[in-house]
Each structure stands twice: as C-alpha cells, then as structure tokens.
Image (cartoon, rainbow, N blue to C red):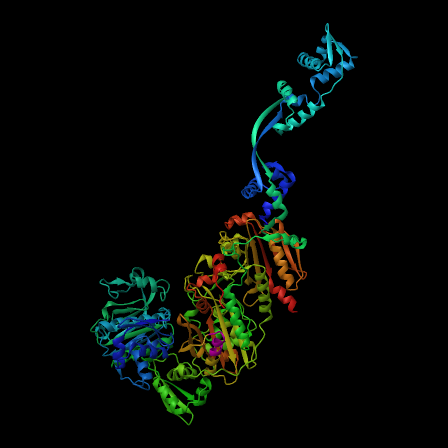
C-alpha cells in the first residue's frame, strides 16, 4: 500500500536514506531548512514508523590553549629537531638553554618515554627518529571542536592528551535520526503530496507521482481590492452618455465668471438677493474681469435691465452698473454656460448641455456643500413650446431609468413659464431635482436669439445619493478608502 | 424662499369653504407653493419670491378663490380720499415714501401675528432686508396729526419712545442701544449724524427703516391702519404699498388715499396702478404648445384674478391688478394661464428627435485613462474644487484664486493643483491595507490675466502610491503603462523639485514636451502632513496632451 507523504516529509526521508543516521542539526543544514520545520517533519515521519529517533551519547572534545599551541609541533618533536641540528648529541644544560626550563623538562620526559633518546651522565643521545602527526592532526580538529560517538573515540590518544591538559572532554546526549526499513520501502512507493503545483513539476512529469494537497476551500480568502472608478463620477458620465444619445453637444464653461455672464445676461437684477455675499462667492483675488469685445451685448443688457427696451417688458427700472457686471465670482449656476453658448450659436435645431461645479456659500453639512455639480441643458428650435420642454425632460429621466415625474409651477428670474420638477424614487418617494423653463423674452433679446429656448438644470448630487442610498452628501467626496473599497457597485 | 405660517381656519375663513389638507396641498402646489409641514391647525407654506402678494392669508386666499372658481377677475376695492397729507423733504439715503390708509381692518390677536409676519417677509424678500424697502404699520386713530412730514433729521436732536419702549430717547440712542438700531441703523444713516424720520405733527411716528415710535402702536382692537413704505426705489415703494393695502382691503376694508407732496411734484398714494396688456391667442398657444380658444384663455386669466375681455377674434385685453408686481411682460401672463390649466394637465410632448452626438473627444480620452488606471489597480478619488490656501502655501503654491467670502478657512481657494488634496487623502488612509494606490482626474484653475475671466482652466491627473516600502518605480511603471497604452511617448528627465527628494524627482516628458512631474515626497513634507509612509506621487497636465494630439 502506497503511503502518502507531504513534500516536506518526502524531502526529509529521502535525505535520511542518503545519510542513514544523523543528528537534527546536520539534517537541517544538509536540507537547507530550519531546525523547527525539520523537527516537525521528523516527528510526523516517526509517528508513521518511517524513521527512528534514538538518543546517543556524544563526546565533545575541545583542544585547550595548550593543545592549540602544540598542534604544529609537540615539545618532544621540537627537542628531536634541535638534537638533530646539534649532531645527535647534546648536554642537558645545552637543551635547557635552547628550550627553556619548563619545555625542556616536558620534552625530555616524553622523548625518553617514546624511546627516542637516551640520557647518560648529563648527556643526550639520539636513539630513534619519530613523529606525532596523528596527535597533531587530532589537535587541529579538536581546536574546532570534535563531536564523536563512543566507538569513534581514539582512546589511546585521549588519555595521554587529557593528562597533558591538551584537550578537555565533555559528554552530551543527542537525538539521532535514522531511517527504518519501513522508511526505505516507503520511499520507493511513496506518493508525494505537495502544496504548490509548479511549472517544473508539470514539465518534468513528476506530477504523476505526486498528489496535490487539498486546500481548505471553504475558508475565507485574504481580502483584495480592485482599482475602481469613483461611483459619483461614473454617475455623471452616465448622465453625459444619456445626453449625447439625445443629440446634445457639450458647452464650454468657466469656474470663475463675471457677474455679467452669470447674472446680468440672464436678466437677474443687480440688486437681486442671489447676487449678494450670502448666496454667491465673490473673489478676493483676482477681483475684476473684462467685458471687452462684448460691447453689443453689454449695451443690450443695460437697456433691457433699465427699461425693457423694445421687448415689451417693463424692465427692472434702475440704473444698470457695468462695474457690478465686471466683478468676478465663482459661477453659481451653469446657465452662464448656456448664455455664452447661445450668444455664439444661433443655428437651429440646437441642443446643448454643460455639466460642472457651481458654488454657493453654504456651510458644509450632511445636506449641503459650498460646491455641487449642476447640469444645464438647452434646446432651441422654431416654435418650440413649453410642452416640448416638459417632453424632453420626461425623455431624459426616462432614459436615466426614472419613469415618474411631477411638475410644479416655479419661479426663476430668467425663465417663464418656469417649472420645478420632482421625480419618484423607489423607497424614497418624491424628491425635488430640477428647475426648468422657457427663457424669458428679455433674455432672448439680450442674447440676440430669435427662437424659443427651453432650458433645464439640476443638481446631480441629490439624485446620485438617491441612487446609491446615501444620506450624507459629504460621502460623495469621501476619501476614506475603507468606504470606497467596500462600496457596492450598482448594476 | 420665504415660508409663512398660516392658521388653517383663517385660510378657510377667507376662502369661505372648508378644505381637506390634501386638497389644500394640491391647490397650493399649483400656485407655486409647497406645504412644508402641517400640524392640525397651522400650515407652514413655502412660497416663491415672485409673489409677495401671497405672503398674507388674505392674499393666498384671493389666489385660491380664483383657481377654485369662487371669485374670478380682478377684485375691486372701495377707495376714498383722506384728509391726510405728507410733505416730503427727501432724505438723500432713502428719498421715497408712499403712505396709505385701510379702514376697518379690525386687528385681533391672531391677525396681529400675521401682520408682523407679512411685514417681516416683505422686508426680507422684496425689501432686500430693509435696504430697498421698509414698512411701518400704525393705528390710524393714534396719529397725533394729519400733517405728516418725511425728512432727514439730526439724530442727536430728536427724541421719541421707540415701539414697546417706555422712556423717550434720542434717535442716536435708538441706533446705539436697541437691537433694531444695531441691526438696521447703518442702512440709511448719513455722515453718522443724519437719519430719515417720519413725523405726525411734531411727534416722531417712525424712524425708517429701523423702528416705529410707540405712540402709534398697533394692537388688538386697532380698527384702521395707517401704513408707510419708504425706500430707495420709487416704483418699488409704490408697488409694495399697493400689495399691502389690497391685501388688507380683502378683509372688507376701504382703502384711503393720501396726498404726498414732493418738492417738485405731488401724487396720491397708494397709486393702485392697473397695467393693461394685450395678449394674442396665437402667442399663448405657441409658447405652451396648445390650441386654446379665446374663451378658454379669458376664463383662465380670470381665474388667475386678471380682468380679461376680447379685443378681437384672437386678442384679449388684460387688466393686471395692482398687487401683481411679477408681471413684467405678456410671457408672465402665459405662465399664469398654464398654472390655471395645471402643469400636470399639460401633456409633455418631446420635440423633434435628434441624432445622437459623439461624447466629446476630451471625455473619451479621460474615460479611457480612467479605465486603464483602474485596471492597474488604482482607486479613483472625487475631490473638492475648493481647497485651503494654508495647505497650498505649505506646499509652496503662491498664486491661486482666493475667495472674498469663504464659509470656512478649509475651503477658501480654488485649487491650482490636486497634490495637496491627494496628500490629505493619503493622510486619512494610513490605517488601511497597503499599498494604497489612488488617482484623481480633475480641473485646476490658474490665475491668467490675459483671459476675460482672469483665469484659465486645465484638467490634470494626479496619482500616488503609498506603502510601508515604496520605490520610484511603483508609480513610474503604472504611469508609463497607462500613458503608453494611450499611444503617448513617455520619458523622464531628472529635475530638482520643492516637493520631492533630491535625486528622486523627474519631469515627465510626453510627446517631447514637459507635461508633469513624478517623484518621491520629501520626508519634511510627509511630516508636515503627518504621514508616516513613503509616497511616490505624480501630476500630469491632460489638457495640454489632449490639445496637442487634437491638432
């Protein structure tokens, strides 16, 4: 019966078959793995009786300083060399002078013991040459530390070196791992279970002998986050697409506008409250724009504001000021873009739109912000009627997926008839989202337009919030990645 | 838009009929009004600012009676002349006055509240917060004399007891000590010394636009009202008086005219001017897209309380009641006809269909770029156009559009870059799983005196990479990938830059021209923004890339 091994177990067992018997440290270093992970595999293998772990006694032999000092040449070898240099014969006194008292005593004793020399009446005689390479090599090894089992001990050397204080011996018990018969058999037939199927395993054909470890497929994976478009910008792009499908072209608009284009051309009186500081952002820098090149329309604005000119209107009955008209503001309505566009484009039929930020000095709150997106659309055609305006608005919302509308008469300074629009959103009810109307005759005369113009504008935030079920307008500007990464996409 | 509180029983009293709340809401909706909230007996009604005549229950009721068909055409009021005269020595700061009387108004506890509300709402809307128009109500029976004077006086030389006061005080004291004085005292004060004042005989009865004198105080039981309207625009002053006296006369009162002597001419007020306009059926039908006949047009006009009679087969002569200050042009009559019909009864009719147009090149370009960046794992951010000048200055930006009346210091400039906002966004996201890869595409506004608006606008991309470890290439690689996928040639050139670490900053060259910067943010700037992670950031001008490719 084939036994199943994990890849790690397999590697350990295979290495053990090579080494037969080894310590954990050696095994780990041979495998290039850490001791704890090898130890874990060994334990698993041992529970399957494929390896055996035994404790053995080890002797750790270390050379002392003395041993290291003499590991190139032992004192008696030194003596022998000097004696040869002196012609094989010397007095003890002579030797003592050359080697020093301490060393010569040791050297004489050991040389004599080895039968290398003879001492007669204070005279030394060379009897036999000898050398101690076995001892020296042992000392060199012991200098680095030697670990030996009992049967490996060179017992003859040990007692002499111990006595000569050239080595010290310590005993230690160590875990020794060896492969069993079962282990050797298992290795032949083992099915290896591996975690990662690699390209190497596939191309080498090794996959035939391996089994891929099952995953815990029911566990939660780590969380990853896709890059995402911002949901509100996406909504604006959706509105843009609908408008282009309906044949609208985009109009150019400016964040910083003169009051002239934002208010005056739209027949908003210069003392209209919407122009004051609590309804419009005025600029500290730069302050004043230019009306150069617009002399024709500036004059028309003046006359129509003051008396109505020949439009059939009463006008506002005040003295119009070009200084006020030149003041720079942040645009408060996108209708400024419609006005500029109609001043320059007179061909019918005409359909145009602008989407952009407009600004009003409202405190930042859950309901209002000092800036918001406004969309403004205009349609100009011969005999275009108020019912046509209602029709095009209905079509726009229908394409956006909103089927129910309600129209309420409204008031805007530049349109008549004017209408405020409510749309029905599932779960929220009726919400007011747009204002619309036919441009007033005074506005058309100012712009030099001959045909009726239907216009409608709406804030995009409220409707986007309704779509996404948000109740705080500030969430549209949230830079909190936790919120953005976890926001659900509408589909 | 103004909101007024009206007791429901009063509205029903005026109309002469009880109505359910739903019926009332529906009818008011057709008159541009919205019932904001309604308790059992008080309605809060939001009106549009073009109909100041409806800011009082009698005025609302007058309009409702019309669309209900209870009363049609222009109401007629009984008018008589009074023996009161006003002599005007026009104060330069507030030269115009109109005065009038309404007899038999019968002020009671409920009505006095409505009267004050009427006055206040007129002040705020039509009166531009008392600058253009201010109104005073007086008990006619308490007028010390029928000789009225309107002139400028030295504020130190006149004393009177202000409304609800107990002690006489100088006009200067009124300006300095009273709440009304502090709030409205500077509107018509000249050289810190002269102020318009209204006298009855020798007695001060009003200090317009600040406060009335207590002597002519209106209280429950007051039967006849004397009304003064002062202001800076003669037509507006006269119109407001017309609105007030016709509204009050709806209580069954009689309007009294007063002779007003200016140095050069004299006049009787209220004027009660009835404008006449001719209206063609063709015009009405063309604007609305309907086929109304003359009879129908006349019926609708009368329901909206105009007098209308046929002039020919397809023209009517319309008489506009004095309280309809919103009728500037025949188009305004057309809207009233539409309101009478009911907007929900106008079948929407889409105009001739049009062929689809191409989404502008620039948006296509920007959307492609957004898609690629998203594909590269970047999260898009949506940022404010307004930003803080302090945070811009911290980064070394000096010239940008600054607001004169910001609502908060945090939003007092138009952004000339997206970088400070991106850094602020990163600061807020140091606790989320790293790496953080974000981008924003948006407009920036630069000061440019060669333009008529003194500014020019550019669309830019800013993107950033933040992580425990971040290297230049973590952003450079995706940026190059995005731009090259768009078919652009990208190169970098080493530069020095105030935002970036020396040796880790580059100019981005696209199609051979400088288009942006890329680099690793200096630790001192990270510290300034309280950011603990390294950041690689870039900003690229997309308008210039697009403009060049378009050519």
Question: Looking at the image, can residue B448 be seen?
Answer: no
Front residue (pair B483, B330):
B483
Residue farthest to the bottom? Answer: B313
Q: Quadrant of residue B97?
A: bottom left
Q: Furthest-left residue in view?
A: B221
From the top left corner, tell me how far across and down residue A28 is, in percent.
60, 39
**Relative vertical location of residue A342 with respect to residue A211 in this rendering, above or below:** below
Left or right? Give the position of B461 relative to B264.
right
For the image shown, how many numbered marks are present on the structure?
A: 0
Relative image position of residue A52 (x, y in whole percent): 57, 38
Q: Residue furthest front?
A: A1
Seen from the viewer's position, the closer of residues B139 and A249 is A249
Q: Which x, y percent locates residue A21?
A: 62, 36
Magenta: predominant secondary structure element?
helix
Residue closest to the eye, A278 or A227: A227
Residue A118 falls inside the magenta stretch: no
Q: Is residue B479 visible?
A: yes
Q: Nearer the viewer, residue B437 or A258?
A: B437
Where is residue A207 shown, x and y percent of the image?
63, 54
| Residue at image coords 58%, 55% | B537
**Vertical relation: A443 (above or below) B209:** below
Is residue A396 rendered magenta in the image? Answer: yes
The answer to whether residue A58 is above or below residue B8 is above
Magenta residues span: A393-401
Q: Is residue B281 left or right of residue B392?
A: left
Q: Residue furthest right?
A: A87
């Amino acid at each position: 019966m084939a036994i199943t091994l994990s890849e790690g177990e397999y590697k350990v067992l295979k290495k053990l078959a090579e080494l037969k018997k080894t310590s954990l440290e050696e095994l780990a270093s041979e495998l290039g793995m850490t001791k704890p992970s090898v130890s874990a595999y060994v334990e698993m293998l041992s529970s399957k009786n494929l390896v055996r772990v035994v404790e053995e006694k080890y002797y750790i032999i270390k050379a002392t300083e003395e041993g290291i000092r003499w590991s190139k040449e032992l004192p008696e070898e030194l003596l022998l060399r000097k004696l040869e240099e002196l012609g094989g014969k010397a007095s003890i006194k002579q030797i003592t002078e050359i080697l020093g008292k301490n060393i010569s005593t040791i050297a004489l004793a050991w040389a004599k013991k080895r039968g290398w020399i003879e001492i007669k009446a204070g005279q030394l005689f060379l009897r036999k040459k000898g050398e101690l390479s076995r001892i020296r090599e042992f000392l060199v090894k012991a200098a680095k530390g030697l670990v030996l089992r009992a049967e490996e001990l060179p017992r003859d050397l040990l007692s002499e070196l111990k006595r000569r204080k050239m080595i010290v011996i310590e005993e230690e018990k160590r875990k020794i791992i060896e492969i069993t018969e079962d282990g050797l058999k298992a290795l032949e037939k083992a099915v290896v279970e591996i975690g990662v199927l690699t390209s190497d395993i596939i191309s080498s054909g090794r996959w035939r002998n391996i089994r891929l470890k099952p995953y815990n497929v029911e566990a939660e994976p780590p969380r990853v986050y896709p890059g995402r478009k911002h949901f509100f910008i996406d909504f604006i792009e959706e509105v843009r697409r609908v408008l282009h499908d309906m044949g609208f072209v985009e109009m150019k608009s400016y964040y910083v506008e003169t009051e002239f284009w934002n208010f005056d051309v739209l027949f908003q009186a210069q003392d209209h409250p919407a122009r004051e500081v609590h309804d419009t952002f005025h600029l500290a820098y730069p302050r004043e724009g230019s009306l150069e090149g617009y002399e024709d329309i500036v004059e028309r604005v003046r006359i129509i504001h003051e008396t109505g000119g020949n439009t059939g209107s009463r006008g506002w009955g005040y003295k119009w000021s070009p200084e006020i008209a030149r003041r720079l503001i942040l645009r408060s309505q996108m209708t400024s873009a419609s006005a500029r566009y109609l001043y320059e484009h007179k061909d019918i039929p005409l359909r145009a739109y602008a989407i952009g930020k407009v600004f009003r000095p409202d405190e930042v709150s859950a309901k209002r912000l000092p800036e918001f997106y406004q969309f403004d659309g205009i349609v100009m055609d011969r005999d275009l009627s108020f019912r046509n305006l209602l029709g095009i608005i209905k079509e726009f919302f229908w394409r956006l997926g909103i089927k129910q509308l309600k129209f309420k008469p409204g008031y805007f300074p530049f349109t008549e008839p004017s209408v405020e629009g409510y749309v029905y959103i599932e779960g929220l009810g009726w919400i007011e989202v747009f204002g619309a109307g036919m441009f007033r005759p005074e506005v058309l005369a100012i712009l030099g337009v001959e045909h009726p113009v239907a216009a409608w504008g709406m804030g995009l935030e409220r409707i986007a919030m309704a779509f996404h079920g948000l109740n705080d307008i500030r969430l549209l500007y949230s830079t909190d990645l936790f919120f953005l990464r976890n926001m659900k996409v509408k589909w | 838009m103004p909101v007024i509180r009206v007791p429901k029983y009063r509205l029903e009293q005026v109309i002469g009929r009880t109505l359910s709340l739903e019926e009332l809401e529906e009818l008011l909706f057709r008159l541009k009004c919205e019932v904001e909230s309604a308790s059992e007996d008080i309605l809060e009604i939001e009106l549009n600012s073009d109909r100041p005549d409806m800011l009082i229950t009698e005025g609302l009721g007058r309009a409702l009676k019309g669309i209900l068909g209870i009363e049609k055409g222009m109401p007629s009021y009984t008018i008589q002349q009074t023996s009161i005269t006003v002599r005007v020595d026009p104060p330069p700061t507030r030269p115009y006055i109109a005065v009038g009387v309404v007899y038999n108004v019968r002020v009671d506890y409920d009505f006095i509240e409505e009267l004050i509300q009427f006055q206040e709402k007129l002040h705020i809307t039509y009166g531009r917060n008392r600058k253009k128009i201010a109104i005073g109500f007086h008990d006619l029976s308490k007028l010390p004399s029928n000789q009225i004077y309107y002139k400028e006086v030295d504020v130190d030389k006149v004393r009177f007891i202000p409304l609800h006061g107990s002690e006489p005080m100088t006009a200067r004291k009124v300006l300095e000590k009273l709440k009304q004085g502090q709030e409205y005292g500077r509107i018509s004060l000249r050289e810190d010394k002269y102020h318009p004042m209204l006298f009855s005989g020798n007695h001060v009865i009003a200090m317009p636009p600040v406060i009335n004198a207590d002597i002519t105080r209106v209280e429950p039981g007051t039967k006849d009202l004397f009304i003064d309207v002062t202001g800076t625009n003669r037509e507006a002053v006269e119109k407001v008086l017309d609105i007030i006296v016709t509204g009050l006369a709806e209580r069954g009162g009689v309007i009294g005219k007063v002779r007003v002597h200016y140095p050069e001419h004299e006049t009787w007020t209220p004027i009660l001017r009835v404008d006449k306009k001719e209206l063609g059926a063709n015009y009405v039908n063309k604007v609305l897209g309907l086929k109304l006949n003359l009879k129908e047009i006349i019926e609708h006009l009368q329901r909206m309380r105009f007098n209308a009679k046929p002039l020919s087969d397809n023209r009517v002569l319309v008489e506009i009641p004095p309280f309809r200050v919103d009728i500037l042009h025949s188009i305004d009559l057309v809207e009233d006809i539409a309101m009478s019909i009911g907007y929900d009864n106008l079948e929407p009719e889409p105009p001739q269909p049009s062929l689809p147009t191409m989404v502008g090149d620039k948006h296509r370009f920007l959307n492609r770029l957004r898609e690629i960046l998203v594909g590269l794992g970047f999260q898009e951010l949506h940022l404010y156009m307004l930003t803080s000048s302090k945070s811009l200055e911290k980064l070394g930006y000096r010239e940008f559009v600054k607001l004169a009346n910001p609502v908060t210091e945090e939003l007092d400039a138009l952004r000339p870059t997206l970088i400070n906002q991106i850094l602020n966004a990163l600061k807020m996201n140091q606790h989320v799983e790293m790496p953080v890869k974000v981008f924003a595409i948006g407009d920036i506004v630069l000061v440019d005196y060669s333009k008529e608006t003194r500014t020019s606008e550019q669309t830019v991309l800013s993107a950033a990479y933040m992580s425990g470890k971040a290297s230049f290439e973590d952003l450079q690689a995706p940026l190059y990938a995005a731009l090259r996928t768009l078919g652009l040639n990208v190169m970098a050139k080493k530069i020095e830059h105030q935002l970036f670490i020396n040796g880790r900053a580059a100019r981005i060259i696209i199609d051979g021209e400088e288009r942006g910067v890329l680099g690793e943010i200096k630790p001192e700037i990270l510290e300034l923004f309280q950011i603990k992670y390294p950041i690689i950031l870039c900003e690229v001008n997309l308008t210039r890339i697009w403009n060049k490719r378009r050519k």
